[in-house]
Image: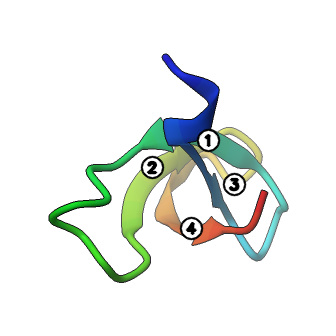
Amino acid sequence: MSQDKLIILRNKETGEIYMSRKNKKTVEKKIELKKYSKVLRKHVAFKEAKK
């Protein structure tokens, strides 16, 4: 994956991060995805954060 296309998805509670990418031509706003948190051991919301 190209480094300039990567975005960071961060969980507010635990501070965990996931690296992902998005199509910036079609998606203008910040994305929020449900991912698995290893600390909480359940699926929670991860929101896009600054690099």
Q: Quadrant of residue 29?
A: bottom left
Q: Which residue is denoted by mark 1 in the rendering?
A: 18
Q: Nearer the viewer, residue 40 or 17?
A: 17
Q: Quadrant of the C terminus?
A: bottom right
Whole-angstrom CA distance, mark 2 to mark 4, is: 12 Å
Q: Secondary structure at mark 2?
A: strand
- Which one is in front, 33 or 24? 24
**Farthest residue toward the top?**
1
Whichever of labels 2 and 1 marks the residue nearer the N terminus, that label is 1
- At mark 1, the secondary structure is strand
Residue at the disc numbered 2: 35
The residue that mark 3 highlights is 40
| Badge 4 amino acid | Glu
Q: Given the image, on which type of amino acid does mark 2 rest? A: Lys
Find residue 18 and report its horizontal and vertical position in percent: 62, 41
Q: Amino acid at mark 3?
A: Leu
Label 4 sits on residue:
48
Q: Earlier in the sequence, mark 4 or mark 1?
A: 1
User: What is the C-alpha distance between the residues marked 4 and 3?
Assistant: 19 Å
Which residue sits at x=38%, y=71%? 31
Numbered mark located on residue 30 in the image? none
